[in-house]
Image (cartoon, grey):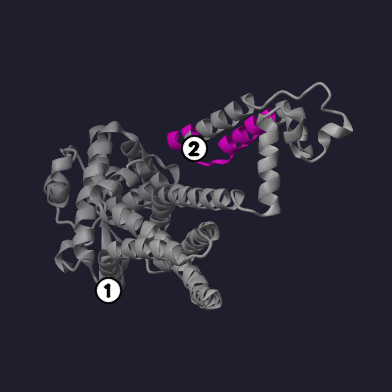
Amino acid sequence: MRSEDTQEAHRSARWRRPLAVFLAVVAALGLVLAVTATWVNRTLLDTDEWVRSVEPLPQDAELQQILGEEVADEILRVIDLTTLIEDLLGPAGRFLAAPAESATRRFIQDATVDVLASPEFEQLWIEANRVAHQQAVRVLRGDAEAVNIVDGQVTLDLVPLINNVIAQISQTTPELFGGAISVPAVTPDEVEQAASNLAGALGITLPPDFGQVPVFDAQALTTAQTVVELLDDTQVALWIIFGLAFVGALVASLDKRRTVVLLGVTTTVAAFVVWVARRPLESDLLASITNPTGKEAAQIVIEVSLWRNLGPLIAALVVVAVLAAVVAFLIGPSRYAIAFRATVRGLFRGDRHDQTAASVFLRRHTVAFRILGAGAALIALLSIPRLTWGWFATILVVLAAYEVSWAYVTPLPPDASSPEATETA
């Protein structure tokens, strides 16, 4: 009977081991994809999250310059600068049209930067993005009437910004528009009526594409709609797959500790692959944007508002996965794990029996390791290009935990430098 039991155990092991490995890999992939899908859904398709992500963009100097150039181009479309100069200076003024246009363009660009940086524009920016995002989400989910489409192009509406730039210029230099005009600034409640309000204030008919920056071809909506539909359908399914595969891997596993190590390593690799894969996805997205201004602006939005949010999430997932794998490995029977545990005992216990060469070395250089920890934290703070309060607090907490742990290290005995003291327990 015992021989039969042994054979049955061997047969069971033959299928349980590969099944546990397969389920562990599926669980890791499911977790990374579920986290990413949830992030995409919340950041790109949730209006409140999107608004929070793009709120600081008007303060970005590079984006200010890009929008300033675009606004200047649009305003100069509705100003007959040559006729205006000829009216002021006569026929000779025609020769001054080119330098006057260059100076006017710089003037409008400077005014645009001032408007973007003003506190009054903050709420307008938030509401304009809220309206635009709600429209974009509706069209991505199949409502084709909810987005601006001009000549087969999906466009970004800059009319509210243009309106407020003209309103500011008209207060100091109304001659630029042919005389005294009254252009009230657009309020957050008037975002959708900005074009009609501006046309009425200027007394002109605006071109259909006025203030519309082409973003990408309308045909590209089909792909985007497919992706959104896929996210809506698979987000919950991915979490279910992760949960079932995780439980199944642990149940099928013959060595649960090794399975957890495999889960941690596979999750780390999958998270790294997702992070690296963002670059070709970004390239494909930017390639679909035909307008140079829209392409530059989209690249800034992607870098500042999207990857900056996804990066910490991926990093946190990797940290948890690595910690789980390390802990599972260190409690195992390998000689490296045993040596590590002996070293830790030697750090926190003063008995000669518990001292190892590694623990004696660490205890002898405690001050040096504490200084190294503080130096590493300082380098981390200086290395983050856009340091946020979240990153700052995280680094401080990790540094505090590191420094406190050294405070509990047992002082080195007076005779610890003798050869006997450094022998392995």
Residue at mark 1 to residue at mark 2: CA–CA distance: 37 Å
- Disc 1 crowd, CA 10 A, few/some/many (<14, 14-19, 20+): few
Res 387 label: 2
Residue sticking out furthest to the top? 414
| SS label for mark 1 | helix
Is there a contact, CB below 8 Å, between mark 1 and mark 2? Answer: no
* Three-letter residue code for mark 2: Leu
Q: Is residue 171 above or below residue 80?
A: above
Front-most of 323 and 345? 345
Front-most of 402 and 361? 361
- Left or right of residue 406: residue 152: left
- Left or right of residue 91: residue 163: left
Front-most of 100 and 54? 54
| SS label for mark 2 | loop
**What residue is at 52 percent from the left and 73 percent from the top?**
9
Magenta residues, as a range?
A: 370-393
Residue 40 percent across, percent down from the top left? 34, 57
Residue 20 percent across, percent down from the top left? 48, 68
- Left or right of residue 287: residue 162: left
* Three-letter residue code for mark 1: Thr
**What residue is at 50 percent from the left and 31 percent from the top?**
397
Res 222 label: 1
Quadrant (top left, top right, bottom left, bottom right) of the C terminus: top right
Residue 274 percent across, percent down from the top left? 47, 62
Q: Is residue 282 visible to the viewer in this orientation of the structure?
A: no
**What residue is at 58 percent from the left and 26 percent from the top?**
404
- Disc 2 crowd, CA 10 A, few/some/many (<14, 14-19, 20+): few
